[in-house]
Amino acid sequence: MKPILLQFSLPILFVFSCGVSNQVDGGGCSYKETISPARVISMAPAYKDSTYFNIWFEIDKEGIAGAGKDTISFYHTNNSHIEYSRVKALGLKTGEVYKYVIMDITKGHCNPRVDMIRLEKYDKG
């Protein structure tokens, strides 16, 4: 009898043990951006005979203590490959430098850290 009582009482206890909060998840979040250079080091079709490409970048996480150079892919940070037509339209070439963006949340209840490649030319200015 005790195992059955335990089996039914634990889920109920779990539901009521979760604190009720007036904070809404998602929406209306603000972020602070840190932008670093991301140099194109390689481009290749994502799959055999594919019109989608993956692009690899060497990033230098400027302004981030203890960080250094690393290699990442467009797919890894942006969760998608890029169509060849877009590669061609943007004129993406090995050696060019684009923006690696790290966004840290400052307000709200969204993902606390987001990183991505923004296909805009990097200007240290």
Image (cartoon, rainbow, N blue to C red):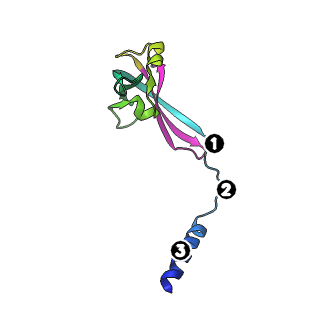
> What secondary structure is the magenta-colored segment mainly?
strand
Residue behind mark 3: 10
> At 56% across and 37% down in the image, what residue appears?
31
Image position, residue 19 (x, y; %): 60, 64
Name the one closer to the observer, 71 or 67.
Answer: 71
Q: Residue furthest right?
A: 22
115 relative to 42, above or below: below
Classify residue 55 by image quadrant: top left
Eye-nearest disc, 1 or 2: 1
Mark 1 vs mark 2, CA separation in Å = 14 Å
> At 38% across and 15% down in the image, what residue appears?
93
Image position, residue 83 (x, y; %): 46, 22
Classify residue 76 by image quadrant: top left
**10 Å crowding of disc 1: few (<14), some (14-19), many (20+):** few
What range is drawn magenta here? Answer: 98-125
Secondary element at tag 1: loop
Residue behind mark 2: 22
Mark 1 vs mark 3, CA separation in Å = 33 Å
Secondary element at tag 3: helix
Residue behind mark 1: 27
